[in-house]
Amino acid sequence: VVCLRHHEGVIDSVDYRLDGQTVSVPVATVLSTMPLRELVQKLDPPAPERVKAAAARLAYRDFITVALIVDAPDLFPDNWIYVHDSSVKLGRIQNFKNWSPEMVPDGRQTCLGLEYFCFEGDGLWTMKDEELVRLGTREVEQIGLLRGARVIDGTVVRMPKAYPIYDEGYETAVDEIRQYLDGFSNLQVAGRNGMHKYNNQDHSMVTAMLAVGNLEGRHRDSWAVNQDDDYHEEGMLEGDNLIEELESLEPTQPRVPQLIR
């Protein structure tokens, strides 16, 4: 997306790049999942300076997955493992086959997703793919999970802005942006990046469902999802058959960090 054009509180059109060309399309409604910072920066006319400043201070943590194909049918029973070993850069390992055998077409092999937490532009992010595959192979062998098996292939996926950072003052910045965006009658935001909230996939899908309902004329506070159970107490989901599902998700979510002085 290149820009979102608006007039008198309504998003009129969206410009985006496709095959090197800029395409402009008229829109009736907009559901944005792009990073909240970028949404503000792409508005035309520009947002007020205070809102642009709030957006500019939002920070993100980036993410790399090094997927290794291992010549072994079964390495360990876990879906994922967090790695607490200061001798390696590796942060977490996913065993995709244990999520579903369908994720690894050849049953004689295993696919491990080695996850590295980084910042866009740092040493890890800028490493060549082949160097990252070698690093991942060396580290997973070092911590003893290969069990003598052989890595036969690998690929790298980089995911910018995978994690919104909860630093001091981020809530004030998000509130400033939210108040401004609430002035658009046909704009809703959803998802982890779209709301700068550390939601899991389930909560992100719920925010999207609520956002769609709002675009259809409902009035539900999607920002209350995964926020101290407010969305239960206010009855905002009454009649949507989502309350039980949301309650079951709560234990899976990290608490929002609070500043202790």
Image: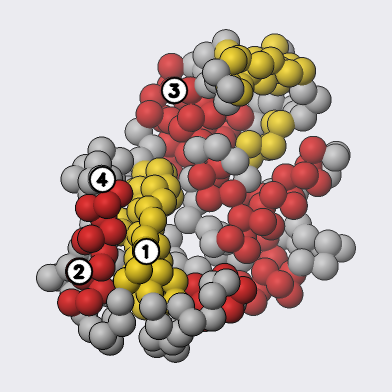
Q: Which residue is mark 1?
A: 153
Label ID, residue 52: 3
Amino acid of disc 2: Arg
Instruction: Name the foreground residue: 38 vs 156.
Output: 156
Label ID, residue 138: 2
Q: CA distance from mark 2 to mark 3?
A: 44 Å
Q: Which residue is mark 4?
A: 128
Residue 81: image quadrant is bottom left
Residue 115 position, x and y percent, is 35, 62
Q: CA distance from mark 1 to mark 3?
A: 44 Å
Amino acid of disc 3: Lys
In front: label 1 or label 3: 1
Q: CA distance from mark 4 to mark 1?
A: 15 Å
Residue 26 position, x and y percent, is 77, 18
Q: Determine whether 129 is above or below 105 in the image.
A: above
Amino acid of disc 4: Lys
Q: CA distance from mark 4 to mark 2?
A: 15 Å
